[in-house]
Amino acid sequence: MTDPEGQTSVDRPVFTVEPWCVREPELRLDRLAQSESVFALSNGHLGLRGNLDEGEPHGLPGTYLNSFYEQRPLPQAETAYGYPESGQTVINVTNGKVIRLLVDDEPLDVRYGRVHHHERVLDMQAGTLTRHVEWTSPADQRIRVTSTRLVSLTQRAVAAICYDVEPVHQSMRVVAQSELVANEALPDGDKDPRASAILDHPLISEEHVANGTKVLLLHRTRQSGLRMAAGMSHHIEGPESMAIETESSPDVGRLTVATRLEPGQRLRIIKYLAYGWSSQRSRPALHDQVVGALAGARQTGWEGLLAEQRHFLDDFWCGADVEVDGDAEIQQAVRFGLFHTLQAGARAERRMIPAKGLTGPGYDGHTFWDTETFVMPVLTYTAPDAAADALAWRHMTLPLACERAAQLGLTGAAFPWRTIRGHECSGYWPAGTAAFHINADIADAVVRYVDATQDERFEREIGLEILVQTARLWRSLGHHDVGGVFRIDGVTGPDEYSAVVDNNVYTNLMARRNLLEAAETAMRHPDMCDRLGVDAEEAASWRDAASAMVIPYDERLGVHPQSENFTNHARWDFAATKPDHYPLLLNYPYFDLYRKQVVKQADLVLALHLCGEEFTDEQKARNFEYYESLTVRDSSLSAQTQAVVAAEVGHLELAHDYLGETSLMDLHDLNRNTRDGLHVASMAGAWSGLVAGFGGMRASGGRLRFAPRLPGGISRLAFRMRYRGSRVRVEVTGESAAYELLDGPAITLWHHGEEFELADEPVELPIEQVPTRPAPTQPTGREPAPRRIDPHSREPRPGIT
């Protein structure tokens, strides 16, 4: 079979299945771009794609700084009021990963000579990427190269590489060239809207310096006016006869080491990298910042950086680890997802978390609602400081959101659908600006964080203003009709195949919560309300709107229409849709999608998860069944929500299938676009599917609740999470759930609706049996791949391919 790039594929997996690492046992050039994303290292500030040390061959070079972008025109086929005129695209900045090697004048290139062994390992406990290569050059010289790479989680600006070269049999002359390279050539882009714009030579040189084993390059962008600096410094060990030179030019800095190695000798290069950028600081200030970061890294040393990295991750895993017995792929995938979710936000420090993290240029490096709805819950309960920083970034962009609302004739704040620095970068109104639910999603993340941490200072200084300005938006966007109900018309919900609709149930429920939480939070901080101009009358108007919010319901079908009249639309002809015509948005006109009952991703079902208290158990079951038959999952965001709700309503095996899809999205490259970067929200969904799905975890109003149940393919699930200063461990088997307080104050929990106190002694309680329901059906050909095989047959379950 062939993949979309026209390259031959084979059935064997790219990565082995192991609990704490991702191992690539052989180099797969046909999957090079995928592995570069999977092996990316980041700390939320700096991201390095997992390119080979020598730089070539590559699928897609990539080194990224959070929020460092270039501005570009955003042309419209027809201009109209309110359309953004420019966009922002993440830049591939100066590449410091490159270490080229020549063996008796032959460059190490895996496409030539003979590769005897090639292995790469992402260690999720150590936070490192290690590569082992044994290669014979075309001139029959055999060498062994080992490199280990890290992006520091403790020293925000720093990355480091330890590079070892050893001859295998005979003496040889080796030359290593450690480089900084700016304005690398990039592959041509494609027409998929999920990919990125390609910007040619976006960096202009301002300074280049070579001194000893140190090199610095400083650049600025042509349009956005941002300035960045990259530096490298080295510690070199080898024979006494080594010759070392450094040089620099506007776009290249290079250190060259030449020596002769005898069998048993080794050349070791420890390369320290540092990066900084600013929109305001001067060139000398950035220069000095990078020099200082390099000095700190050298003082810590390679072994010290490794120790700091391990300590940071040990602390994270103590409050975040998930253990799964019975499904080894899911065990690996949930840790992989947690690791990359942490990397996306650990040191972002009041900057955004992009949809791809810092693993690739997909979606132009933009952040969407994905972060607050799918990534933030994981960070809130496992790494709350990172969640607070991401929300603080949203608060910093509030002035721009208020300007955007005013431009649209609204009060309050209209947060952008997609952005890097807070400006709206979506040129498509129906699936962009009209998706106002992002404002409630951000507000919901604020409420969730405050509930989980009781961070009163955050609530006063950051959360309150976000809640107030988003509440003002809903009050001005909606209106009371002649019957007195409050309507929100002309919006797009999470399902982008149903655009500009009236009273989307998800949007209205989330807006109602937003309005009520803003009013309640305002009451707790009257002094801050004075500063924000909130009075009792305005808060009362929010409560009035919330209490009168219309929530459509179809009495005929006994389900909630996704939006008004949705259930009256014609159903999409799934049987006539060819398998290669998915995703539909790339093969059918939007106008046809908009007028049919076809769902791109969980919308009403997402409301069942996030606003579950608004539905009865029977309504959840009926709604889930109805929308299963319409949802095609053309978005990677959908499967995790379907997993959570399927588990809640009793379809445990189906939930397991959806869990596999969200968990393995990138490790198995299910959408064939992992080359552009990882799907961070989908990977976060592995945690949600297990903890919120099979663990039944819900939290709000100081109540941490669990309703655990396991599918047949998982015999044990254990997870850890943080809530209100306590660290809790939950272990679930088929018969019971055990709760343990690892540290922090005693805490009140709920198990299947029953309240109990968790203190010094663990508590074990029986699992309530799940109600038996008929299995729902999915659109033809869109069933999730099964995680289990029918024990009476070697074939997959009927109807699943």
Image: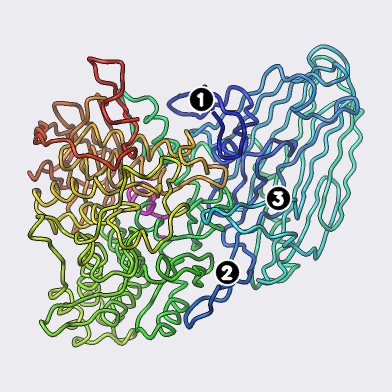
Disc 1, SS = loop
Image vertical order of residue 129 relative to residue 561, above or below: above
Q: Quadrant of residue 100?
A: top right
Instruction: Decide if residue 487 is on the left or right side of residue 664.
Output: left
Magenta region, mostly helix, strand or loop?
A: helix
Image vertical order of residue 487 relative to residue 753, above or below: below
Q: Which residues are magenta?
A: 375-389
Q: Amino acid at mark 3?
A: Leu
Q: Which mark, residue 266?
A: none
Mark 3 or mark 2: which comes first in sequence? 2
Instruction: Decide if residue 89 is on the left or right side of residue 572.
Output: right
Q: Which mark, residue 13?
A: 1
Q: Which mark, residue 87?
A: 2
Q: Are marks 1 and 2 in contact (CB under 8 Å)?
A: no
Q: CA distance from mark 3 to mark 2?
A: 20 Å
Does the segment drawn in magenta span residue 272?
no
Q: Nearer the viewer, residue 598 or 243?
A: 598
